[in-house]
């Protein structure tokens, strides 16, 4: 969890800011998961920070949603193409993935549980 927090801060994912009047922050929480090896032993512990988006109303708080996922047919086509052309494939494990896009909206989120505030701000706003 601490490494995830450090990565989020190092990427300037948010900045502490006072909550403006009339704005409601989105809550968040840590989701924990234990990854196991095939023999049942523990490989690693994972932590993910997720927003409590269920408190938002479509059309009021947001317009669309987007989740980057790969369809299995796309993966199969890529594998078939690589096999046909003799290309080599490599697997990569990404610890922290960030979409490089700018938000047009202001979003305010409560600081994550366990987050130590040094600036005294009451809300978190994406940078």
Image: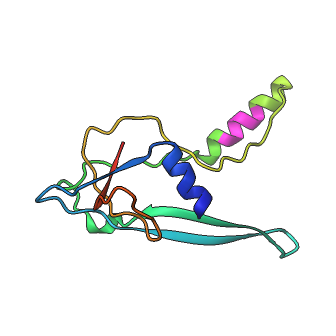
Side of 40 where 113 appears, left or right = left
Quarter of the image for the C terminus: give it. Answer: top left
Tell me if residue 74 comes above or below residue 43 in the rendering: above
What residue is at 20 percent from the left and 63 percent from the top?
Answer: 24
- On screen, 38 above or below 5? below
Q: Residue at x 57, y 57 (%)?
A: 4
Main secondary structure found in the magenta portion: helix
Q: Point out the image quarter for the N terminus.
A: bottom right
Q: Position of residue 66 (x, y in %)?
A: 40, 47
Residue 69 image position (x, y, % from top left): 54, 47
Q: Position of residue 83 (x, y in %)?
A: 83, 31
Q: Nearer the viewer, residue 97 or 116?
A: 116
Furthest residue in direction top, as rendered: 85
In magenta stretch: residue 98: no
Q: Residue 40 placed where, x, y %?
A: 83, 76
What colour scheme was applied to this rendering of the protein?
rainbow
Which range of residues does the magenta coloring cover?
75-80
Q: Nearer the viewer, residue 65 or 126?
A: 126
Instruction: Tell me how many marks there are.
Output: 0
Q: Residue at x 44, y 46 (%)?
A: 13
**Which residue lies at the image location 50% right of the left edge and 42% below the top edge?**
11
Q: Quadrant of residue 75?
A: top right
From the viewer's perspective, is 106 left or right of 90?
left
**In terms of image quadrants, where is residue 36?**
bottom right
| Identity of the residue furthest to the left in this view | 22
Q: Nearer the viewer, residue 2 or 28?
A: 2
Q: Nearer the viewer, residue 85 or 63?
A: 63
């Amino acid at each position: 969890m601490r490494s995830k927090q450090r990565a989020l801060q190092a990427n300037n994912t948010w900045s502490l800011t006072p909550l403006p009047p009339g704005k409601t922050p989105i809550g968040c929480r840590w989701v924990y998961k234990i990854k196991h090896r095939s023999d049942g032993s523990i490989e690693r512990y994972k932590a993910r920070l997720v927003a409590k988006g269920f408190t938002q109303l479509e059309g009021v708080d947001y317009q669309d949603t987007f989740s980057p996922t790969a369809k299995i047919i796309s993966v199969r086509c890529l594998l078939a193409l690589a096999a046909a052309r003799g290309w080599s494939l490599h697997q990569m494990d990404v610890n922290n993935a960030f979409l490089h896009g700018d938000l047009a909206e202001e979003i305010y989120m409560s600081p994550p549980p366990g987050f130590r505030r040094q600036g005294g701000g009451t809300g978190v706003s994406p940078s």
